[in-house]
Image (spheres, rainbow, N blue to C red):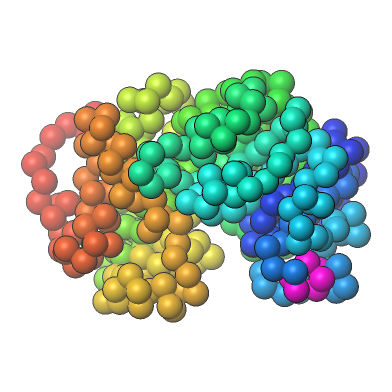
Amino acid sequence: MTDNNGGNYRQVTVMGAGAWGTAFAMILADAGNQVRLWARRPEIARAIEVTRCNPGYLRGVRLPDSVTAVSDPGDALADAEAVVLAVPSQQLRANLAQWDIPTGTDVVSLAKGVEVGTLQTMSQVMEASGIDHGRILAVSGPNLADEIAAKQPATTVVAGNDSAAAERFGAACRTAYFRPYTSTDLLGCEIAGATKNAIALAVGMAMGRGFGANSMASLMTRGLAETSRLGESLGADPHTFAGLAGMGDLVATCMSPLSRNRTFGEHLGRGLNVEEAAEVSRGIAEGVRSSASILQLAERQDVEMPIVERVVRVLGGKIEPEEAIRSLMARETKPER
């Protein structure tokens, strides 16, 4: 199931060959672009070139012939007209310091997090690293990589400070199974994308304790309220949080067993500590890295985020998951809005 819309770029580079980076390379190729996929490990790049499959992620998913794979960052970035950053949020700044991204390119973040220490979103990290403000974009929405790799229908938001850049990239990644919308609320989309990971950890903890749909729906709804409060305090458009980058991404991340953050939370709810959950999950979920930064950002803005606060306390070993959820129920009653 492919369709060639004649993508707007002669060459697009995806920096990062994890599950989402690999799936996004497939999307771009199916949309008619020539795509270079950078893999940190040379053996992954070689395997993709030989077998057309990524042996580390999305096994069995064949990549289009218009996707080439390399392991040298300079080779990957040469002549790129758009660069997609598909690396973990806490590694983005260090990677940008090492990579020579061509000037005049659209630069797109797939990462969802708030940087430890600086409390910056990924677009703010990108701008601080010298990338042109008007060329910075982010993709955010209910986009589970495994489902997209199977070409199941999905929508997303391409957000940027410049609407023309968002529309340009949105047109270049539209396929029969992947429909992008655009937004100029870049900050709102990023806050929604980062915070939903922390909420998904809480939902996973509730599932791990055996709680049902009422508990999950309550955490998701009040988690969305927390996210909206934080975003609006930073100047985001409140409508963003009712859309794909807000509610849409939150629902997908909290409800799908394919979500690493929800699954990680389930392990915590069943009694594993962070180190044990990381071993079972084959790595740390993004929300584990960013939750404390999100809470610090909220405290700086004088915004109350009780769910995120309790997630941080669980991750720090200060309280147990069930105590965290029960303590939310003991909070003072007040109007919903």
Residue 335, above or below 148: above
Tell me, yes or no, whether the highlighted magenta stretch contains residue 46: yes
| Lateral position of residue 152 relative to residue 208, left or right | right
User: Magenta region, mostly helix, strand or loop?
Assistant: helix
Q: Quadrant of residue 11?
A: top right
Residue 314, position as x, y percentages in the image? 24, 62
- The residue depicted at 85 percent of the width and 58 percent of the height is 68
Residue 174, position as x, y percentages in the image? 77, 40
Q: Quadrant of the N terminus?
A: bottom right
- The residue depicted at 86 percent of the width and 67 percent of the height is 49
| Lateral position of residue 211 relative to residue 283, left or right | left
Residue 127, position as x, y percentages in the image? 56, 30
First to last magenta residue range: 43-48
Tell me, yes or no, whether the highlighted magenta stretch contains residue 114: no
| Lateral position of residue 319 relative to residue 278, left or right | left
Residue 166, position as x, y percentages in the image? 68, 28
